[in-house]
Amino acid sequence: MSSQRSLSPVTVIGLGPMGRAMVASLLRSGHPVTVWNRTEKRADHLVAGGATLAPTPTAAVTASKLIILSLTDYQAMYDILGPVAEGARSSGVLAGKVLVNLSSDTPDASRGASEWAAGHGASFVTGGVMVPAPAVGGSGAYVFYSGPRAVFDVHEPTLRQLGEPRYLGEDPGLAQLFYQAHLDVFLTALSSLLHATALVTSAGVPAADFLPGALNTLTGIPMMIGDGQDLARRLETGEHPGDLSTARMMGATANHIVWTSERAGIDIRLPEAVRAHYDQAVVAGRGTENWTVLYEIIKSGG
Ligand code: NDP
C-alpha cells in the first residue's frame, strides 16, 4: 500500500451501498477521500474509517480534481451539481474537474451530461459497475468506461481500485449502453428465476428442491447454445438453420409455459412476452428456422 500523500485525492458523491463500497476500496488503497451525501449520516462509518465529510456539494467538488458520482440516476447528479455549477457565486467551480459518473441511466443521458459538463469546463467519463457492491475492489470486479481517452488514462490507476477498468471508446453513451445491455440479461434472468420458482412452489414443491437445478440451467446455457463468439457469428450472418430445433417447436413450449402459469394462477406477463416473439416468427413464415431467428423479430421492432 502507498502512503496517502503519494496518491491523488478523490471525491465520491452518493453513499448508497455502491458509493460506500467505492469509498471503502479507495480508502483501503490509500487515497485521501472526500465524501458528500444528501443524507449525511450515511457517511458516519466512512468518516470513522478515514474519509472526510464535505459540508456542501461545492466543498466536495472543490476538494479533488476527480469526482466520482454514484447515484440512483443522472437527475440526482443535476440536483446536486446543478446549483454548484450554476449558482450565482459558484461559477467556475466545475472548471477543470473530471466527473466520472457511475450511475445508471440511458446512453442519451450520458451524452447529454457530457455536453453539460463541457459547458461548465469539466470533463465527463461514463461508467457502469458490473458487480454488486460487496464485490467492488475485489478480484473479478470490473467496470465499463467510455469518454475522452486521454482523461480516462490519467485517472485509470485510481479507477482501477474499484475493479478492472474496461474502456470502450470515446462515445460517452457506450459504457451506459453496455451496462444496460448486461443488465438486460441479468434482470430478465432474475425475473425468470422468480417466475419459475413461483410456478413450482404453486404445486407445493419447496423452492429449495428447484432452485439449484434452475441455476444449473442458467450456467449451462453456453454449453447448449455455444459461446459468445459462436452465437455472434450466427446472428451476424443472419442464417438460422433449424436442423436441430425450430422456432415452431420452441414456440409450442413457450405456449405451454403460459398455459401452465395461467393454471397455477401466477403472473403470466413474462412468459407471454417470450411467447409473443415465437408467435411473430411463426407468423412471419420463419417457424422452421432456429430459435436465433427471434433476433430478426426483435431487431425489427416486433
Ligand atoms: P442507492 O439508490 O441506494 O443510492 C443512491 C444514492 O443516490 C444515495 O446516496 C442517494 O442519497 C442518492 N440520491 C438519489 N437521488 C438523489 C437526489 N435527487 N439528490 C441527491 N442524492 C440523491 O443506489 P446504490 O448505491 O445501490 O447504487 C448507485 C448506482 O450504482 C446506481 O445507479 C446503481 O444502478 C449502480 N449499481 C449498483 C449496484 C449495487 O449492488 N448496489 C451494482 C451495480 C451498479 P440518499 O442517501 O440521501 O438517499
Image (cartoon, grey):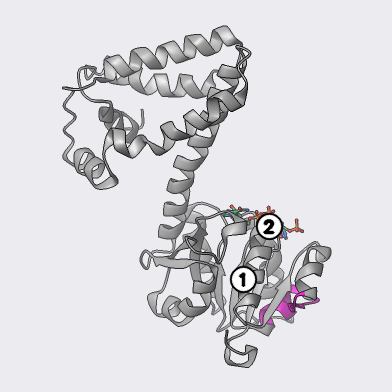
Q: N-terminal of the two: label 1 or label 2?
A: 2
Q: Secondary structure at mark 2?
A: helix
Q: Amino acid at mark 2?
A: Pro
Answer whether residue 50 is magenta in the image.
yes
What number of labels is visible?
A: 2
**How far across and how far down the image is residue 79, in percent?**
70, 62
The answer to whether the beta carbon of the residue marked 2 is less than 8 Å from any atom of ligand 1 is: yes
Quadrant of image for the C terminus: top left
**How far across and how far down the image is residue 230, in percent?**
22, 43
5 horizontally vs 292: left or right: right
65, above or below 56, in the image: below
Residue bearing the label numbered 1: 25
The residue under the point 50% across, 51% down is 106
Which quarter of the rendered image does ligand 1 occupy? bottom right
Local crowd size for mark 1, using a 10 Å CA cut-off: few (<14), some (14–19), many (≥20)? some
Magenta-tinted stretch: 49-62
Answer whether residue 284 is magenta in the image.
no
Instruction: Compare residues 293 and 297 and report the one nearer the observer.
Output: 293
Quadrant of image for the N terminus: bottom right
Label placed on residue 17: 2
Label placed on residue 161: none
55 horizontally vs 262: left or right: right
Quarter location, residue 29? bottom right
The residue under the point 48% across, 14% down is 258
Q: Secondary structure at mark 1?
A: helix
28 horizontally vs 240: left or right: right
The residue under the point 60% across, 11% down is 203
